Image (cartoon, grey):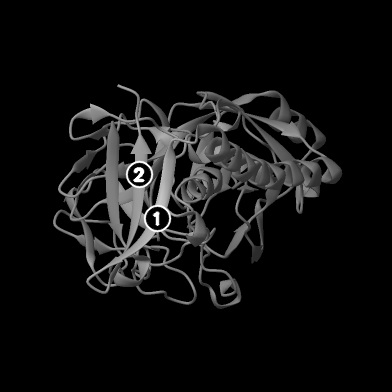
Amino acid sequence: MLALTVLRSQACRKGEHMFTTINPGFFTTIQDNGRWGYQAYGMPVAGAMDRYAYRVANLLVGNKAGAAVIEMTILGATFKFDESQLVAICGADMQAKLDGVGVNNWSSFVVRKGSELKFEYAVTGCRAYLAVRGGIDVPSVLGSRSTYTRAKIGGLEGRALRQGDVLNIAQDIEDIENGIQTRVLEAQYIPCYDQNISLRVLLGPQADMFTAEAITTFLNNEYVITDEADRMGYRLVGPKITHVNKADIVSDALPFGAIQVPAHGMPIIMMADRQTTGGYAKIGTVISPDLSKLAQAKPGDLVHFSLCSENEAIDAFKEEQQRYTDIVRSFHDQKNSSGLVRHFSIVVNQQAYKVQVEEYIS
């Protein structure tokens, strides 16, 4: 049996309606790599909370690394597609269903014209990412399409999606030559979202403002994520972390993952929408490769901190970057081993089409 999928040429897509928001879910925004280069002027980076799930979603549909995607939190959205398109879902398992039939997380698949893709509550993790081949086409503000709702910039009118919002697709495609490819992420690259997470930390830059006993307390106890956990920061509660003297400092820079400790002694971990500077002493910073685990954690989950050296942090970062390379290589192997999907470029009445032919054994 042959299944034929016809998708219009990329040159025809820009500006066309792609899909409509039927139900926006709890908090659904458009995000990309973030708004870099403007923190000196007080503009946060923003961008996807879970950088790993975001990037893998784009890889699954062949997008450029910086393409804009949909980020859903806790309760997913529902979309209706106005034309056939290749999409991918990654991150939290929000029980996605395509026209009522379950679809695999961490995979890409073709959504037919008129189909409805629906997400429910997250059964594991906290944030799911929906990538569409080409990315989401919204205006770039200061070099990014990320939504920063506190300043009402980026994304779609600087806000979370609403019912009836119609989203267009862009042309941020990396592997144009390979055409449409459905892919499945190999199990070894799929993270497990635990409710008891361990985060590696580099101490500083104000670690000397804490007693030795306080640092021991910080590293040897568990903390609980409170209800005050959002894109700006995660507040934790647990054994008190004591300062040598006071908690306040002259405000300085706040990176993604910085751990502030105000006078009450409870840590706050700064996330994607954090302010650019802060006036509380920072006991340490969560290393970048571990931030995806925290981005998928929910209120009530437990957090442990472990001390990490600079060299270990660098090695962890290199391993994360190598993982992306390995994932792309695994996609190439899938393509070569299956032999069931073929792609053609044809012209009919001066209209260019990309044609995907999939063969199934029935």
Q: CA distance from mark 1 to mark 2?
A: 8 Å
Q: Quadrant of residue 94?
A: top left
Q: Secondary structure at mark 2?
A: strand
Q: Which residue is mark 1?
A: 344
Q: From the viewer's perspective, is residue 254 above or below residue 23?
A: below
Quarter of the C terminus within the rendering: top left
- Front residue of this view, candidates 61 and 296: 61
Residue drawn at point x = 23 percent, y = 38 percent: 118
Q: In the rendered view, does 50 fall on the left or right side of 329? A: left
Report the disc number at residue 357: 2
Taking the image as drawn, is residue 122 in sight?
Answer: yes
Residue drawn at point x = 66 percent, y = 24 percent: 221
Taking the image as drawn, is residue 182 in sight?
Answer: no
Residue drawn at point x = 28 percent, y = 47 percent: 5
**Residue flagged by tag 2: what amino acid is it?**
Val
**Residue flagged by tag 1: what amino acid is it?**
Phe
Residue 349 x, y percent position in the rendering: 22, 71
Residue count near mark 2 (Cα–Cα under 10 Å), binned few <14, some 14–19, many ≥20: some
Q: Secondary structure at mark 1?
A: strand
**Do the residues under discs 1 and 2 have CB atoms within 8 angstroms?**
yes
Residue drawn at point x = 42 percent, y = 60 percent: 68
Q: In the rendered view, does 140 fall on the left or right side of 6? A: right
Residue count near mark 1 (Cα–Cα under 10 Å), binned few <14, some 14–19, many ≥20: few
Q: From the viewer's perspective, is residue 63 above or below residue 267?
A: below
Residue 293 x, y percent position in the rendering: 56, 36
Residue 356 x, y percent position in the rendering: 36, 48
Q: Quadrant of residue 333?
A: top right
- Front residue of this view, candidates 168 and 180: 180
